[in-house]
């Protein structure tokens, strides 16, 4: 599959450079710049500060440009085409191809709207299930079950996003499918993550914090023996479930247990990218907001929004919560600024979590609706709604 860093190329052009000009500025070959933009290589560490200055971006923004890889030629290989026509012939090379396609879609999640990913992800999920149902080789069938578990989890995530978190049945069906597939191959990491996704639906969709906390705890229990990162992430949502019911001591106890997991993370923990200090802080800020302690939430969320520049959908959620924390402290100028940043992020990604928080903040601003700044925000929200 061919891939390109399209946003990197656009940034280079907006900074006034051709590939040749940027290469000359950096004292590298033009082909080196071409390989960066074709996602074949990345700039070496010593070159990155100079490249960032040339493109007029920060180091974090440069990393986001490098991480944003878009598949430009998604035509199946001959082997894949043959496997779809003769499914009993599927082999581990076909499984690897499917796994790589899923990985690239997953890596696009924080940069692309879920609506643009759903069709490709749905086609991939259907192919995985079809080949798994017809595979003749037991090893291949087992490997396809593993891809199916991940694919079903991703599909549930996308479907829920696209529905603006209103449709709970379809995503839960996908997550249940993922749990079944994970149990079939005895993979507790995938089972725990799919169970945690069910907890998200309970917490943010069904507005059932008790069920959400129970599901998140189930996910933590499943993950305990295999992934401290996934255990910690699950415990954060246990904490959030308690925060939603106003149970301060239980919430903070769960936060402490989640924080303890950082000391247990090991190099083989495949879920480590999901569980970072930024994610911990984002959820801790959310917890204090639910506990009606906006003055404690604000500094945590401020720090988190800056750190999540490369993860736009997570940043939109953090910005929405920061806006709510500022509104509830009557810091209206700062709240208006944060609200505009929230809408900017939501316009880019259309993530359901950020979108819902943007409208929640808009509702809390209604008491100032006669103010010009509040009217401007309301106009942007109406435009955002029209574009959904």
Image (spheres, rainbow, N blue to C red):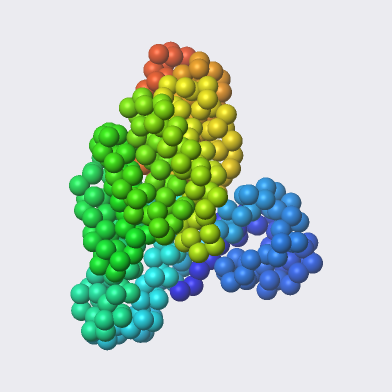
Residue drawn at 67 percent across, 50 percent down: 59
From this view, report whether residue 168 is shown above or below residue 39. Answer: above
Task: Pinpoint residue 60: horizontal percent, then vertical percent.
Answer: 63, 49
- Above or below for 261 versus 386: below
Q: Position of residue 53 (x, y in %)?
A: 74, 51
Left-right relation of 194 to 296: left
The answer to whether residue 49 shows anywhere in this view is yes
Q: Quadrant of residue 16?
A: bottom right
Residue 362: image x %, image y %?
A: 40, 25
Position of the C terminus by quadrant: top left
Look at the image and tell me whether residue 112 can be seen.
Answer: no
Residue at horizontal 49%, vertical 72%? 2
Q: Quadrant of residue 165?
A: top left
Identify which residue, 20 or 154, lies in the foreground.
154
Depth check: 292 or 71 in front? 292
Q: Position of residue 364 (x, y in %)?
A: 39, 20
Q: Is residue 205 left or right of residue 358?
A: left
Quarter assignment of residue 333: top right
In percent of the image, x 74 and y 61: which residue is there? 47
What quarter of the picture does the N terminus occupy?
Answer: bottom left
Query: At x 51% / y 28%, what residue is drawn?
Result: 297
């Amino acid at each position: 599959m061919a891939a390109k860093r399209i946003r990197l190329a656009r940034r280079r052009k907006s900074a006034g450079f051709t590939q040749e000009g940027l290469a000359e500025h950096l004292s590298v070959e033009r082909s080196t710049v071409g390989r960066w933009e074709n996602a074949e290589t990345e700039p070496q560490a010593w070159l990155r500060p100079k490249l960032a200055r040339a493109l007029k971006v920060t180091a974090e923004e440069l990393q986001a440009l490098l991480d944003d890889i878009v598949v430009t030629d998604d035509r199946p290989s001959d082997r894949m085409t043959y496997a779809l026509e003769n499914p009993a012939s599927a082999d581990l090379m076909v499984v690897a191809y499917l796994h790589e396609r899923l990985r690239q879609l997953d890596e696009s999640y924080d940069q692309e709207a879920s609506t643009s990913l759903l069709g490709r992800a749905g086609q991939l999920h259907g192919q995985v299930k079809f080949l798994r149902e017809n595979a003749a080789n037991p090893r291949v069938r087992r490997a396809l079950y593993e891809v199916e578990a991940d694919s079903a989890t991703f599909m549930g995530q996308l479907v829920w996003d696209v529905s603006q978190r209103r449709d709970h049945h379809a995503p839960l069906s996908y997550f249940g499918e993922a749990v079944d597939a994970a149990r079939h191959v005895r993979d507790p990491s995938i089972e725990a993550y799919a169970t945690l996704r069910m907890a998200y639906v309970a917490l943010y969709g069904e507005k059932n914090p008790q069920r959400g906390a129970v599901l998140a705890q189930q996910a933590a229990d499943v993950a305990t023996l295999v992934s401290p990162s996934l255990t910690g992430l699950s415990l954060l949502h246990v904490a959030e479930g308690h925060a939603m019911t106003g149970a301060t001591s239980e919430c903070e106890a769960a936060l402490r247990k989640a924080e303890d997991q950082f000391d247990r993370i090991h190099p083989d923990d495949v879920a480590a990218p999901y569980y970072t200090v930024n994610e911990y802080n984002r959820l801790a800020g959310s917890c204090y907001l639910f506990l009606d302690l906006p003055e404690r939430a604000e500094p945590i969320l401020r720090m988190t929004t800056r750190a999540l520049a490369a993860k736009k959908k997570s940043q939109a959620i953090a910005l929405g919560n920061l806006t709510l924390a500022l509104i509830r402290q009557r810091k209206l100028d700062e709240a208006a600024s944060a609200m505009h940043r929230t809408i900017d992020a939501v316009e880019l990604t259309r993530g359901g979590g950020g979108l819902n928080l943007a409208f929640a903040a808009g509702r809390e601003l209604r008491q100032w609706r006669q103010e010009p700044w509040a009217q401007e925000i309301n106009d942007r929200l109406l435009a955002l709604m029209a574009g959904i």
